[in-house]
Image (cartoon, helix red, strand yellow):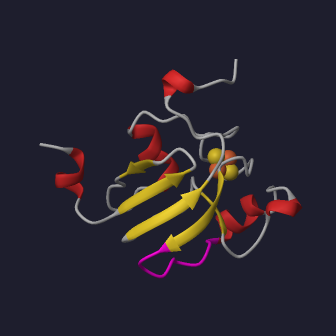
């Protein structure tokens, strides 16, 4: 059975890569992308300690939960020129419904260029 058929309506399109991932209930975006085999920029592997995983939410079919205190701490580490109300940490953001986010540096392993 295909992944999308198991998970239902929660989906996230990641631009500019153009990949769509299907988070499980309660699963943060970065984990869903990693489970799908994508490389996601991170230095702390989801501990909300680096800010490297940040995304800009372009569209969301459902209202997003406000950032938790933990996410707010990590958001302070995002470069100031990238900060804004639509910027979230992919390691903390739990998608609901359909979303589109932007994050350069997300890549399929075969196209990764960080060596
Ligand atoms: S992975 Fe480090 S803050 Fe999200």
Q: Could you tell whether 46 is left or right of 9 in the image? A: right
In the picture, the quarter occupied by the C terminus is: top right
Residue 91 in percent (x, y) is at 57, 53
Q: What's the residue at 48%, 36% (across, down)?
A: 38
Q: What's the residue at 18%, 44% (across, down)?
A: 2
Furthest residue toward right: 80
Range of residues picked out in magenta? 60-68
Q: Could you tell whether 106 is left or right of 99 in the image? A: right
Q: What's the residue at 55%, 60% (across, down)?
A: 101
In the rendered image, the vertical position of residue 67 relative to residue 8, given as above or below: below
Q: Could you tell whether 53 is left or right of 93 in the image? A: right
Q: Check if residue 35 falls in the magenta segment.
A: no
Q: Could you tell whether 37 is left or right of 101 in the image? A: left
Magenta-drawn stretch, dominant element (helix, strand or loop):
loop
Residue 67 in percent (x, y) is at 62, 72
Q: Which residue is more in the foreground, 55 or 18?
A: 18
Q: Which residue is more in the foreground, 37 or 20?
A: 20
In the rendered image, the vertical position of residue 38 relative to residue 79, given as above or below: above
In the picture, the quarter occupied by the N terminus is: top left
In the rendered image, the vertical position of residue 74 relative to residue 61, given as above or below: above
Residue 74 in percent (x, y) is at 73, 58
Furthest residue toward left: 1
Q: Quadrant of residue 82?
A: bottom right
Q: How many marks?
A: 0
Furthest residue toward bottom: 63
Q: Check if residue 64 falls in the magenta segment.
A: yes
Q: What's the residue at 59%, 46% (across, down)?
A: 46
Q: Which residue is more in the foreground, 77 or 110?
A: 110
Residue 105 in percent (x, y) is at 65, 40
């Amino acid at each position: 059975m295909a992944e999308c058929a198991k998970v239902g309506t929660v989906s996230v399109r990641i631009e500019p890569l153009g990949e769509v991932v299907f988070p499980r209930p309660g699963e943060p975006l970065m984990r869903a992308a990693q489970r799908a085999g994508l490389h996601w920029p991170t230095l702390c592997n989801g501990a909300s300690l680096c800010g490297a995983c940040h995304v800009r939410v372009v569209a969301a079919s459902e209202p997003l939960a406000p950032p938790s205190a933990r996410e707010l701490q990590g958001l302070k580490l995002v470069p100031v020129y990238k900060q804004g109300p639509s910027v979230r940490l992919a390691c903390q953001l739990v998608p609901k419904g359909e979303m589109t986010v932007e994050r350069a540096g997300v890549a399929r392993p075969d196209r990764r260029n960080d060596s």
